Amino acid sequence: MTLDVHEFIRRFLLHTLPDGFPRIRHYGFLANGHRAAKLDLSRRLLANPRQDNIEPHVESTAAPAPLASAHRCPCCGGSMITLAIWHCGQAPPGPLWDDTS
């Protein structure tokens, strides 16, 4: 294929990143350092989904928090609260808190 000089440069520059954008090939469990071990662990975890140790609902006189979750913050150990849940393809809800104060 023969290309005009300007067309060749245009096509070539489609493969370059703008200044300030680093090229990241793999990140996280696909990084080169421990890729095989992390992929093996991921496959094992996906084959055996984790069962959360959530106790069955016990009726009490106190009203339970409607959005409380059994998850704990990894930093401080405090209880994490679910503010909203939405599914793939669904628009997120409006503001989760009031910014008028």
Image: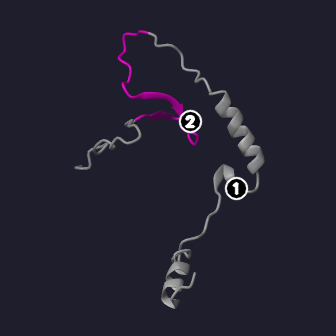
Which SS class for mark 1? loop
| Quarter of image, res 21 | bottom right
Q: Which residue occupies 62% across, 64% down? A: 24
Q: Give the overall secondary structure of the magenta segment.
A: loop
Q: Position of residue 56 (x, y in %)?
A: 50, 13
Identify the magenta region.
Answer: 59-82
Q: Which residue occupies 72% across, 38% down? A: 41
Mark 2 burial class by Cα count in 10 Å: few <14, some 14-19, many 20+? few
Amino acid at pointer 2: Gly
Residue 99 lies, with reference to residue 83, above or below; the image says: below
Residue 99 lies, with reference to residue 76, above or below; the image says: below
Q: For mark 1, what is the residue? A: 31
Q: Does the CB distance between marks 1 and 2 fall below 8 Å?
A: no
Q: Position of residue 99 (x, y in %)?
A: 26, 49
Name the side, left or right, on which 56 lies relative to 40.
Answer: left
In primary-sequence order, the first of circles 1 and 2 is 1
Q: Residue furthest bottom?
A: 5
Which SS class for mark 2? loop
Name the side, left or right, on which 63 lies relative to 53.
Answer: left
Q: Which mark is residue 77?
A: 2
Amino acid at pointer 1: Ala
